[in-house]
Image (spheres, rainbow, N blue to C red):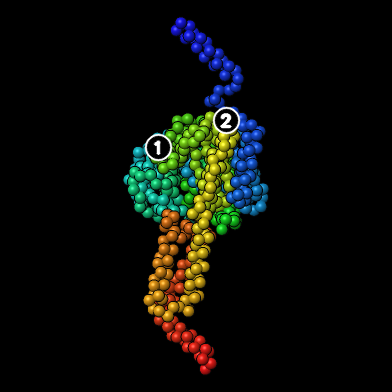
Amino acid sequence: MLRCVRTILAVATLGAVLISTAAGPATSEPTTATAAEKTAAADYLAEVVADQKIPGLATTVLSPGVADFEWTSGADGNGVPITRNTSFLIGSLAKSMTAAAVMQHVDRGVLALTDPVGDHLPWLVATSPTVEELLTHTSGFSGADGLAVAERFDNSPGAVRRAAEDLEYSGTQGRYEYSDANYLILGALVEQLDGKPFGEVLRTDLLEPLDMRGTATTSDAASDLPPGHRYWWGSPRRYSPGFDESGTPFGYVASTLDDLARYARAHAGANPDVLDPELLRQLHTPRVDAGDDDYGYGWRITPSDLGPLVHHTGATPGYFAHVMLGPDGQAAVVLANAYSEAKAPVLASIAENVLLMLNGQSPAATDGNPLLTALPWVVSAVGALGLALAVTSWWRPARRLLRWTTAVAAIAIVSGLCLLPSFFGADLRVMRLWMPDAAIMLILSLITWSLAAALLMLPVRSSIALCQRRFHLERATGQ
């Protein structure tokens, strides 16, 4: 009896396998999105563009070897419609390119991951971190260290080394802390090994072999880059800072949807002559815990309903970029010509949501950062209140205690406003680049509250107030 049952189960199992094989492709092979799924994805993108007031957006999703979905919207900063060949700054997505260039040098045997960076750059402020620690943001350079030398807009020869020489070292070696400083140093390291500017090495060793000829790594090559957009109280305004060759290793590369599609395909394994499977494995392998995800070499690895996603976002003032490698050889590219820290969560969710929708799943709801969204309005209100106090302080209270108490409160508010940029891990210079509306209102608030405090404390005001009271008294008595 037991033997008969086993026989029946074996036959049934074999039949089920044969039926499922005949019915369609195996689950490990990607399926082409249906027309309804593509329409839903396009509707989602149109809604995001409208809600976030994005002037121009370009998106594509690739199945192995083909573009399964493509969507462009709006115009660049010059009013020209967005196309596959519109140029965008790609921000920190450039770190993945720098990591690839470094690993090419490791493969050639001219560099080891365990090398202390000081073996090659003895002039660096911190010589003990290894090449691998730089790749994984565990070198000890803090986020503030990197921000302090970013956006220098230095395009003269030696820009990368000059920026690296100006670095400070304020973090803890061995602990993960995302910092542009790490990849700036890796760019200087590549320059030292090759005796050529980093942008040239990146172009000849990686970009041209991948046929990414519309990608720029120098200010001259990026001369046709259209303006991006920053947000002022939620509305986009044109912004054209120019190119920064000192930032090429960590953020200043300009590229197109067409070129980044080639780049995504190469990281999905389509160009083994340039990026071989072993090199890709090393780049994409999780190395350190980075909070909500892991960090490899220039790539984040994040769990999702689709499976592990290998990806990196990038942002510069005015632009956003994202390349995401999904399961089964799929990849998504998103480019936008507008950026604010308040909208970062929404922009960063687009690639995964489009992949989800094209795989028949529902997108995840994502909102902007409420604190950063409200910040310009809050600082504006604080500035208006300071101005009102400065004006009315000419009619200050007669009681000395109340006057000095108000002055002390005004000084405390000025101190708090001075510390506000550090709350976001930045200084006023960085805040002016990334949050211009909040920065300008912060400056005005500092002026109005400082003026109010000074007016409340000035001794000469007592005689002014006395004259005002005497004037009103004389009018009241008719004298």
Position of residue 268 measured from the top left corner of the image (x, y, whole percent):
52, 33
Depth order, front residue of 156/112: 112
With respect to residue 71, does 243 lie above or below? below
The amino acid type found where label 2 is placed reads Pro
Helix, strand or loop at label 2? It is: loop
With respect to residue 7, does 258 lie above or below? below
Looking at the image, the residue that sits furthest to the bottom is 479
With respect to residue 78, does 392 lie above or below? below
Depth order, front residue of 278/409: 409
Q: Residue at x 61, y 43 (%)?
A: 45
Question: Can you see residue 297?
Answer: no
Q: Residue at x 55, y 23 (%)?
A: 26
Helix, strand or loop at label 1? It is: loop
Identify the disc placed on residue 64. 2
Q: Is residue 293 left or right of residue 265?
A: left
Position of residue 375 measured from the top left corner of the image (x, y, whole percent):
50, 58
Depth order, front residue of 310/399: 399
Looking at the image, the residue that sits furthest to the front is 477
Question: Can you see residue 350?
Answer: yes
User: Do the numbered discs 2 and 1 sit on residues whose CB atoms are within 8 Å?
Assistant: no
The amino acid type found where label 1 is placed reads Arg
Q: Earlier in the sequence, mark 2 or mark 1?
A: 2
Position of residue 174 measured from the top left corner of the image (x, y, whole percent):
34, 43
> Marks 2 and 1, Cα distance to the nearest angstrom?
26 Å
Identify the disc placed on residue 445. none
Position of residue 371 measured from the top left corner of the image (x, y, whole percent):
49, 54
With respect to residue 217, does 32 lie above or below? above
Q: Residue at x 52, y 59 (%)?
A: 376
Identify the disc placed on residue 287. 1
